[in-house]
Amino acid sequence: MRGTANTRRSFLISSAVGITATAIARPSWAANEEVRVAILGAGWRGGQLADAFSKARGCRLVAFADPDRTLSEAMAAKYSAAAHVDLRKVFDDPNIDAVVIATCNHWHCLATIWALEAGKDVYVEKPLSHTQWEGRQVVNAAAKSDRIVQIGTQQRSDPMQAEAKRFLHEEQALGKIQYVQANRLGPREAVGKRTSPLEIPSTIDFDLWVGPAANQPIYRDKLHYDWHWDFNTGSGEMGNWGVHILDDVRNVAYQDKVTTPSRIVAAGGRVAWNDAANSPNVHYALFETDSFPTLIALSNLPKGPGQKGGWSARAGKPIDGSSSGYVIVCEGGYYLGQRQQGRAVDLDGKTIRAFKGGDIVPLHVQNFVDAVQSRDAGSLNAPVEMGHHSTGWCNLANIGFHAGAAYDRDQLSSASSLDAWPLLIEEMERQLAPFDVTTSQLVSSPILTHDPKSERFVGEHADLGNAFLQRAYRGKYVVPQI
C-alpha cells in the first residue's frame, strides 16, 4: 500500500519555505490501486470534470468541496463521495491523493499552492492565474515539490495537434508562416444590473467564496458562473475562451518556442448592455513576437440587436476562419484550426487536407491520472509552466484593456506594419454600428513592451503595465511569494 501524505503545514504561509520536496515521496501505484480524487468547485465545470474523472481508468472520486454546500452535497451524493464546504478539509485528508481545481478563477493559484503544500497532485482548470506574478508562484511551487500538476487546456491531448504541427513545420506544406488571427466570436447576454447588492444565501460561505479577491458587493443577478465577467473574480472572455485558442496558437503555430509576446496593444470595451460586469464584451489585441505576430478578436455581441448568431471577422483574409478558432496565414495558404478539427486550404480556398480530432476531455484527464500513477511529470501533455505561459497572453491582453485610455485609432493602427491589423480594427468597429455604439465608448492602450524573461514591462509605458502585474490579497488568503 502507498504511504499517506504528511499533514500539510499551516496554510498561513508568507514566504517560499512552504513548498519543498520533503513531503511525500510516494511510491508508484500498484496495478490495482486507484488514485483518490477530490473535486474543488462543484459548479458547471466541476460537474463536467467529475463525469470525466469518474470514467477514467485508475481513479476514484472520493470528495467534493464548494463554498456553496448545496452544490457540494448534491455532487457528492451523485458519486457516493464526501461533501465539504471548505477546501482545506480536502487538503488535510491523507486519504486524498489528487485534487481537481474547478473553482472560480481567482482561487486557482492559491488552491494549487495549498494543495502542493499538502502533498497533493493537481489538475487545475484554465486560466491558471489572474496575474503573471501569481502564476509564477505556482510554477515555482510545482518545481519545488515532487507533485504532478496539469493545466486544463484539454486540446493539448488531441493527437490532431501533432499532425497539424508536422504538416506545417516539418513538411512545410503551406510555406512560411506570416501571421495568425485568433477568434472567439460567441454571443452572450448581459448579467443584469441591480440597484441593491445581491443577497447571498445562507448555504454559501461567502467569505470563503471570495477568498483571495476583494470582498465587494455584487450587483449582477447571479452569483455563479457570471463571476467570469467581473475582473475581481474572473478574467473575462480573454481568460475564459481566449486561453484555449491562444494555447492552441502557441502549440501549433509557435511550437511553444515563444513563451509570451514582446509587444502588445489592445482595445475594447463593455458596450451596448449597461450591466454590472466590467470585463469587455468587445476586445481585440495585437501580440508581437520575435517570430511572427498574432491578432485576436473577441466579441460577445450578436450580429445585431435581437439577432441570433455571432459576428464574423475576416480581417482581410480571403477565407473565413472559425468563430472559435484561429487561422495561420502562410505564404502558400491557410491552416484553419479549431477544437477537434482543422483544415488546410490553398490560396484559392481549396481544401487540401482535413484534420479530425479526438475526444479531448477523457484523453486529457487520463493523461493526468496516468502521470500521477507513473510519477512521470514529463508525460504530461499540459504541464503547469505551459499553462502559465499561455495564460500570460490573456493576462497581457487584459492589462492592455486595464491600461487603456481614450480610444486612439491612429495609435492603434500604427502599432504594426501588418496589413491585417488595421483591417481587423475596422471590422471590430463596424460591428458596433447596429448597436448605436461609437468608438468613444471604447478604450485603447499604448504599445506596451514586455520582457518574457523577467515577465515585466520595460521601456516607455512600463509603469503603466507593471501596475497590473500583481493584485492585492485579502487577510488569510494571500498567495505567497515562492
Image (cartoon, helix red, strand yellow):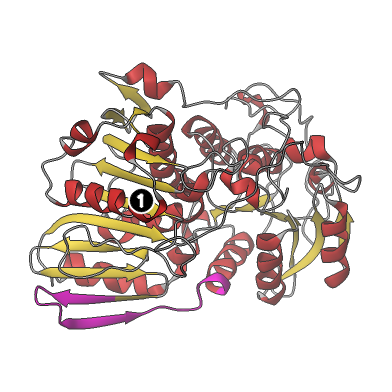
**Within 10 Å of the Cα at label 1, are there few (<14), some (14-19), or many (20+) other Cα atoms?**
some
Marks counted in the figure total 1
Is 42 above or below relative to 309? above
Give the quarter of the image for residue 115: top right
Magenta region: 343-362
Q: Name the element at disc 1.
A: loop
Q: Residue 251 or 297: which is nearer the viewer? A: 297
- Res 213 seen here: yes
Q: Quadrant of the C terminus?
A: top right
Q: Position of residue 61 (x, y in %)?
A: 77, 66
Q: Which residue is mark 1?
A: 432
Compared across the picture, whether 165 is left or right of 2 comes to left
Q: Residue 16 or 250: which is nearer the viewer? A: 250
- Residue for point 61% across, 23% down: 472
Q: Residue furthest right?
A: 202
Q: Position of residue 66 (x, y in %)?
A: 80, 51
Compared across the picture, whether 322 is left or right of 305 comes to left
- Residue for point 34% across, 24% down: 457
Q: Position of residue 161 (x, y in %)?
A: 35, 69
Is 7 above or below relative to 334? above
Q: Position of residue 469 (x, y in %)?
A: 47, 27
Q: Is residue 357 magenta?
A: yes
Q: Is residue 472 magenta?
A: no
